[in-house]
Image: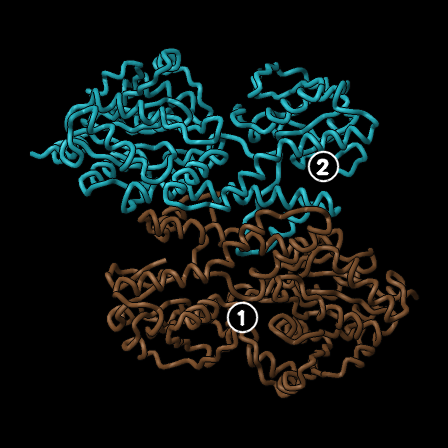
Chain colours: A brown, B cyan
């Protein structure tokens, strides 16, 4: 029996062990989704604290239901470890590690590289390997393959199989979770395709095969590039509308009445989170290697990079109406999460505006019911203050439109409001809108 | 009774006469839609030939049903004239004139200006005036108003009312026609709003009021800017995919499986028609007056402008495989319409590619079942040749994916194909794809 037949038989008999590398906002929901379908899952996590939490059934990811985690831990279908040597117990390994940008906005491939080294050194013959982390096209074939072959001494296509299947996790999305979001999957060989489809189909309702990992890699980047350029475009037009005395929010609501060929995007203080501000720049990076300049992504990146600064200028202009400067004024930020109703402030533009306002001498505070404390890029640390501080602030800056924020109450209690999210629908002299 | 009460009463009693200026692809469908609802319509059209055709019930616009036109002419509800003095008979005037760009891509406002002069010189007191032509925000208030006041000697708000309501005609769209496409409407005064809503509601199922003409003007430009930047983005990524050995069409089909937050756009040889390649540049133009640079539109425009040239290079590369040059080769273009199944070649990128190929010494022919003859920007004139010419052509370039084109037949009969529309789904050595 060939290695491929061997693993396919195991999958058929529900005997396969699947390792998931990285138990973060992608890996943990995936691990739980598989384990709920009675697949044997080992979760690999470098943080011993997180691994221990998982093994105790203590959930730390918003998109995972607490009870689901408890149940799959109790049933023994999921266990977590920080011991990567146990990759040798796995028939398949799925990689869900971060792919950040460094401070020069270049891809930071260290997490993928280190995962490949761990896998190469520990895996047994006949292991299926799939990357889910967003990265530039050609990563699987040209970056991962040589590392794994070198570390393992094994040969791709015979001894192991490589594939790519992009995660499509949308934090806070209650309609589309891991199991009911269609999954794109591309393998390097026919055997890899068969094995990967057999594994994923156990947990995911719809797996959509494509002809290669590089196509699957490009799919994910296209999805998020679409979002980046549309948000950047509407941000740029919003800034123009501010000068032309046109309410951009009214424009968008009216444009939405077009029943075809339009999708609404909304302006804001900038783009946050771990996908849209990062993914397109992975593509821009690899494009250079092909002597290719992605001008749309470049331009969108430029707009996005300038947004926090432009928002600081808005705050300055608002205070100017009251004959005040940023320097010495009490400025309260309402909401620092990068989108509503989640507890995640990664890449949040609010933090960048807070840095700039603080550096200009503003007395910065913030209130966010979801986030008790933050540390900004410039190293400033803040704790969420009481909501009532809006009453004694010179300016309140609405950065996140959490559902719990009451527009009427904010207007009645604040002296001056800079609303970057169209939270305040009433007309008021106090309100300065994006 | 005030002028406003007077016209509102007329509208209520179905006594109002509505003039429609310009009986082109926007004006004629609108005129017929109104007349079908028993509104008295006078169509004003500078071309005596077109006016005569309308009066004889001879339809020349694809989106108008021949019988609808015949019926409203027979019932007397619609009549056409080239005599603009008859504007004096109208209670309301709707302007549907072209708003092209000049050869330096600057707005050509002459049609709107001349319409305003005709109206100002001929209208009676108490006339409602609405512009439907796409134009930059502030046109109605800052460009039209002074011209009409000057020519008429009348005063806005008392003697006449100005408004803007963007046309949303999508040529060839069979699901959404004039009457069932929601219509955005913005007037300068409350009276103008009341009158305009009362008129439009007779013909259009859903009229969506906004607070000012400039908001309505921006709505239309936002809709088409959205399309411009997304098509440009996918064109740029398609060119990169060509270098990376990634099938962009496969990528888009896979990305479409994402059930939220994605709308598919497809690459092509460039953007054609009378909206998307023009409208955003109206906004770019006015933005300059506000010291504002619309970098996304600028970048998208740059990509779009280069597409025909890049397609010419694709043709050159394809011929190179056969050790041929463009110079001296027979090159047949299949489809010159700017989109499938319509008879309109305005701004079609096919014509620009034909010009460049011809200028490089190519022996250019085209076949399009919808378009018997064309004249390019460089002044070359062509007549559609027989489809069978594909058999004796050195290269066939698919520029429009008309439904009537049979991919299998084209592959079997052609020597070499450059497919810019993903018409050919089979793999073949003969086919060179965008």
Write the residue at 26% across / 65% down: A323
CA separation in Å, label 1 and label 2: 41 Å
Tell me if residue A193 can be seen. Answer: no
* Quarter placement of the N terminus of chain B: top left
Label 2: few (<14), some (14–19) or many (≥20) C-alpha neighbours in 10 Å: many
Write the residue at 68% across / 75% down: A22
Up the image or down, B148 lies above or below B387; here it is below
Would you identify the image quadrant in which residue A268 lies? bottom left
Would you identify the image quadrant in which residue A390 lies? bottom left
How many numbered circles does the render carry?
2
Write the residue at 73% across / 68% down: A112
Nearest to the observer: residue B73 or residue A150: A150
Under tag 1, what secondary structure? loop
Write the residue at 68% across / 30% down: B312
What chain does mark 2 sit on?
B
Q: Where is residue B38 in the image (x, y as percent from the top left)?
A: 26, 27
Q: Position of residue B243 (x, y in %)?
A: 73, 44
Residue carrying label 1: A346
Q: Is residue A338 left or right of residue B84?
A: right
Q: Position of residue B378 (x, y in %)?
A: 58, 19
Residue carrying label 2: B433
Q: In this view, does A85 lie to the left or right of B104?
A: right
What chain does mark 1 sit on?
A
Q: Where is residue B304 in the image (x, y as percent from the top left)?
A: 57, 37
């Amino acid at each position: 029996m060939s290695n491929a037949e061997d693993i396919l038989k195991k999958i058929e008999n529900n005997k396969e062990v699947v390792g998931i590398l990285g138990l973060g906002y992608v890996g943990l929901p995936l691990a739980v989704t598989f384990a709920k379908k009675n697949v044997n899952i080992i979760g690999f996590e470098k943080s011993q604290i997180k691994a221990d939490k998982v093994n105790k059934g203590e959930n730390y990811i918003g998109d995972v239901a607490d009870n689901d985690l408890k149940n799959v831990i109790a049933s023994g279908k999921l266990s977590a470890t920080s011991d990567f040597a146990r990759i040798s117990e796995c028939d398949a390994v799925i990689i869900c590690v971060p792919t950040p940008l460094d401070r020069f906005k270049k891809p930071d491939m260290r997490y993928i590289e280190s995962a490949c080294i761990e896998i190469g050194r520990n895996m047994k013959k006949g292991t299926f390997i799939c990357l889910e982390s967003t990265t530039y096209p050609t990563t699987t074939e040209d970056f991962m393959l040589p590392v794994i072959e070198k570390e393992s001494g094994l040969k791709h296509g015979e001894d192991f199989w490589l594939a790519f299947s992009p995660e499509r996790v949308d934090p806070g999305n209650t309609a589309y979770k891991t199991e009911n979001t269609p999954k794109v999957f591309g393998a390097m060989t026919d055997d890899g395709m068969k094995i990967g489809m057999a594994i994923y189909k156990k947990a995911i309702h719809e797996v959509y095969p494509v002809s290669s990992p590089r196509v699957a890699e490009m799919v994910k980047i296209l999805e998020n590039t679409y979002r980046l350029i549309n948000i950047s475009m509407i941000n740029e037009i919003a800034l123009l509308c501010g000068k032309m005395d046109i309410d951009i929010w009214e424009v968008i609501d009216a444009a939405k009445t077009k029943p075809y060929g339009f999708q609404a995007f909304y302006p804001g203080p900038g783009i946050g989170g771990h996908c849209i501000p990062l993914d397109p720049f992975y593509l821009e990076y690899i494009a250079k290697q092909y002597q290719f300049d992605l001008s749309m992504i470049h331009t969108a990146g430029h707009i996005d990079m300038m947004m926090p600064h432009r928002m600081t200028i808005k705050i300055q202009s608002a205070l100017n109406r009251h004959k005040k400067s940023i320097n010495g004024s009490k400025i309260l930020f309402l909401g620092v999460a990068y989108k509503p109703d989640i507890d995640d402030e990664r890449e949040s533009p609010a933090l960048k505006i807070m840095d700039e306002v603080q550096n200009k001498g503003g007395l910065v505070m913030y209130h966010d019911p979801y986030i008790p404390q933050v540390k900004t890029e410039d190293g400033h640390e803040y704790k969420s203050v009481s909501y009532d501080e809006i009453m004694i602030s010179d300016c309140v800056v609405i950065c996140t439109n959490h559902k719990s924020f009451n527009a009427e109450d904010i207007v009645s209690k604040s002296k001056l409001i800079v609303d970057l999210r169209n939270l305040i629908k009433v007309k008021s002299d106090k309100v300065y809108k994006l």
